[in-house]
Image (tube, rainbow, N blue to C red):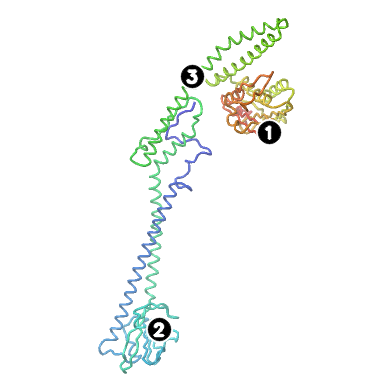
Amino acid sequence: MNQPVSPGSPGPTGNRGTFARGTFARGTLGRQLLVRVLLIVAAIAVLLSGASTLAVSRQLINNADRQLSAIVDRLRAPGAGFQTADALLRGGQPIGTLYAAYVAGSGAEADSGRLASTNGPQVIKAALPDSVLAELSGVSPDDGPTTIRLTGLGRYRVAAYPAVFNDNQQGTLVVGIPLSDTDRVLSRTVLVAITVSLLALIGAGVAVQEVVRRSLRPLNRVAATAQQVSQLRLDRGDVTLALRVPESDADPVSEVGRVGQAFNHMLDNVDRALAARQASETKLKQFIADASHELRNPLASIRGYAELTRRERDRLPSDTAYALGRVESEAERMSSLVEDLLLLARLDSGPAIDVGPVDVTELLINAISDARAAGPDHHWSLELGSLDQGNHPPAVVIGDRNRLHQAVVNLLANARTHTPAGTAVRAGLRVEGSEVVISVNDNGPGIPAEVQGRVFERFTRGDDSRTRTGDGGRSSTGLGLAIVAAVAEAHHGMVRVWSVPGDTRFELRLPLAPGPSAT
């Protein structure tokens, strides 16, 4: 019987522990939410940083343009006049301010005699390099203030203005101020924006993790309940399905609450279906047990009367003698079937078995000896693995000797009954960890793939379209392997089968007895 598990208790561990993964493990909803929110925060931070940097850049450029305009206004003030290059070098201008005067009629080149420049922390009277003059000559008054990179000087904000010098020569005055301070401010602004964005991203990551973790707790509790239900054995026995999603997680106001409520309704339906199934199985098993018990007495009487006719059969007509022989044979088969049904009914009602130490090696030797006598047309062999070298503890289990012997006999009888004469059947015994493994292999035709999944069910036969015969021509009852499975379960073990044409293997695994033999 499966024991109910409280919703708050941890579920069994194993390969199916999917819900035991972390909230932010790969592929989880928590990780997807975290990544998507951080991407959104990062995009917003980039947009805000870019917008802030662009606004600061435009403000600084506007300031530079106002400085250019102020310089030109001072030069155009009454009495200032545009005289010679020396007159352009006035004090009070921004450090690094650049002037270039182009006199009309000089073409694309400037008159170096009418050129003055300041470039650096001190005012320097010097002609600009030809490369710079060529770059400045391309600035037109129609262009307005523009930013250019001058060879060897860096970025400058320059503007060209029409001018008439005092010597009545018309020309163009180019004024430029360096943008080194602007570039430094922009660099610092970008650095601050990147730093603030990273800090915001880290802070958002921490906050989002906590928010997502708290938000997903109800969903994780629902998932944990679902996992615990998925690991319950609901296929047989009296199942108590007491697991439910807590009421706090089954409030239909939220999406998770609707899932929890629907899950609880599903569990209620499953619980009612399991209860109805169990009641039906109980009635059926009780009927089989009662019918089998009641059939024992009339079958015993039939067999007794049939045996009484043996001494007179040689004087009876041949048809009558044959019929009485068939009555006796079928009565024996019916008695065997009834005994098998009674055994299954007892095993279903609970492990009412005589428990004690059982030497599986001795049990298997006796069973293979009986199989040789019952099937002399098969080739029987026994392999004890490392047990016969004496370097392994004895294969001892705690169980019912008679039931275990019957399980092994049924495995051997199954190989004998469903394989043709001349088939090699090999029984084996080994100890693997804390289990004793009994194996039965044969090289017969194998079990059809569509039958292997239900071979341990009651009344299952390898091929329903033909009758397989066993001892004395009697057909198989289809209960032998079902008894093996029931005995294995009663001893907390299991039985498995692998089969392909030419190789069929059954394995009966039983817990090794504790103590010195299990060390």
Task: Look at mark 3 in the image and give the residue it sits on.
Answer: 283
Question: How far apart are the alpha carbons under marks 3 and 1?
Answer: 40 Å
Image quadrant where residue 312 sits: top right
Q: Position of residue 175 (x, y in %)?
A: 35, 83
Task: Look at mark 1 in the image and give the residue it sits on.
Answer: 503
* Label 1 secondary element: strand
Image quadrant where residue 385 sits: top right
Q: Residue at x 36, y 35 (%)?
A: 247
Question: How far apart are the alpha carbons under marks 1 and 2?
Answer: 94 Å
Q: Measured along the vertical axis of the image, is residue 293 above or below residue 57?
A: above
Task: Look at mark 2 in the image and give the residue it sits on.
Answer: 138
Tell me the quadrant of the picture where the C terminus can be found.
top right
Q: Measured along the vertical axis of the image, is residue 310 above or below residue 14?
A: above
* Label 3 secondary element: helix
The amino acid on which the numbered mark 2 sits, given as a three-letter code, is Gly
The amino acid on which the numbered mark 1 sits, given as a three-letter code, is Asp
* Label 2 secondary element: loop
Q: Position of residue 462 (x, y in %)?
A: 62, 28
Q: Residues within 10 Å of mark 1 (few under 14, many from 20)?
A: some
